[in-house]
Amino acid sequence: MAKKQDFDWEAITKTIIEKESKKGGGENNLDGRFFVPKRGTDGLVEYEFRFIPPKDMMEIGVPYVSWYNHYVYYNNKIFISLCPKTLGKEKDCDCCSEYLENWSEGDENAISYANKFKRKLNVVSNILMLNDPLNPENNGKVFLYKFGWQILEKILTALKPPKGSTEGPRKIFSLYEGTTFKLIVKIKKGDMPTYEDSRFKDGIQELSDDVINIAETNCYPLGDFIKPEKFDIENEINEKFANFMLKASGKKVEFKPKNIKSEPETKKEEVKIEEPKIETSDLPFNLEDDDDDFWEKVKARKNK
C-alpha cells in the first residue's frame, strides 16, 4: 500500500458545506480532458469512477470548482455570458434580476418567462475512470467531469448526510478512503438524459498503489476555471444584456454602470454636509434550480 499523504477531509468537507450554503451539462471534449457521458443503444448506460482531488487542491481548498453562467434563447435571439454573481450575491447581474422579478410574480406565465433567464450551475471535478462500458480504453485514465446540481446534491449528501440518516459522512474524494460512484444515465421523455438514479457504492473501495500514482500524477488543476477576473464583469454583462433585450423584445433596459463617481452638486455660501452613505444589498437570493421552497417564502413575505 502506498504511503498515505491524504488531506484533512473533515476540514475540507466543512469548507464545502459552508461554501455551498452561501451560494444560496454537456461539455465539448475538444482537448480530450473532459469525460462526456454517452447514451447506450437502449438509452441506458452505467459508468463507474472515483471523484479525486485536483492538482491544486492546497491552493483552492476544495476538490471541485463551480460557477454560474447564462444561456438565454428568446425570440430567436441568444444571450450567453458568465454570471458575476459567481463572486457573491452582492454582485449585480441584470439577467438574474429579470429572472427574479418575474419569478416572484408567481403566475404561470411570469414563471415560464422568468425561467428563460435562470442561471445555470456548472461544477467541474477530476475523476478516475474505473469502468467505461462504451469506451473501455478510458478505464484507468483521469478526466475532468462537468456536471450540475443533480450530481452535486448526491456529493453533498454523501459528505454530510441529513439528520436522521443511518449513513455517516464519507470521504468520497479521498484516494485512500474514497467510494466509487455509479453514474447511471437514463433517457426520459423528450430524449433528455437524467442521472437521478446515480449513487455512491457502499463502503470504502481501496485502490492499488499503481492506480493511486496514476491519479496523483495525471489529475488536473482547477483554479483557472474560477479566476475572479473572469467573473468581474458587472458592467460588461449588464450593457450586453440591455442590448440583447432591446433586440429580442424591444424592451429598453436601463444600463447603469457601477463604480462611476459623479461630482456632488454644491451651492455658494452653503455649508457642505456629508450625507451618510447608505449601503444597499441584494436579498439572500438563491437561484438554484430546485429552490422553489425558498421562493414561496419570498412571495409570502412580499404579500404581507
Image: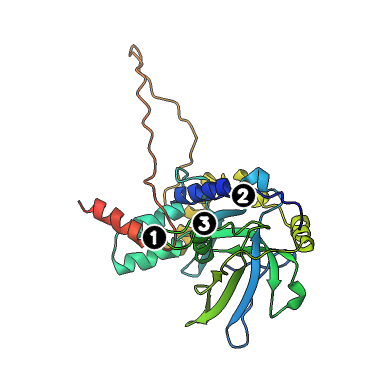
Work out whether mark 3 precedes mark 2 in sequence or the reverse, and give the earlier one: 3
According to the picture, the residue beneath numbered tag 2 turns out to be 226
Residue type (three-letter) at the residue carrying disc 1: Gly
Of tags 1 and 2, the one toward the viewer is 1
Of 237 and 89, nearer the camera is 89
Q: Position of residue 91 (x, y in %)?
A: 47, 44
Residue type (three-letter) at the residue carrying disc 3: Pro
| Distance Cα–Cα, label 1 vs label 2 | 35 Å
Task: Please report the residue visible at 53 percent of the width from the left and 65 percent of the height from the top.
Answer: 151
Q: Position of residue 274 (x, y in %)?
A: 37, 20
Task: Please report the residue visible at 61 percent of the width from the left and 78 percent of the height from the top.
Answer: 46
Of 183 and 34, nearer the camera is 183
Q: Residue 221 vs residue 151: left or right?
A: right
According to the picture, the residue beneath numbered tag 1 turns out to be 164
Are dots 3 and 2 in contact, CB under 8 Å? no
Q: Identify the element where label 3 is drawn.
A: loop
Q: Identify the element where label 2 is drawn.
A: helix
Label 3: how many residues lie within 10 Å, few (<14), some (14-19) or many (20+)?
Answer: some
Residue 169, disc: 3
Give the quadrant of residue 29: bottom right
Of 4 and 232, nearer the camera is 4
Residue type (three-letter) at the residue carrying disc 2: Ile
Q: Identify the element where label 1 is drawn.
A: loop
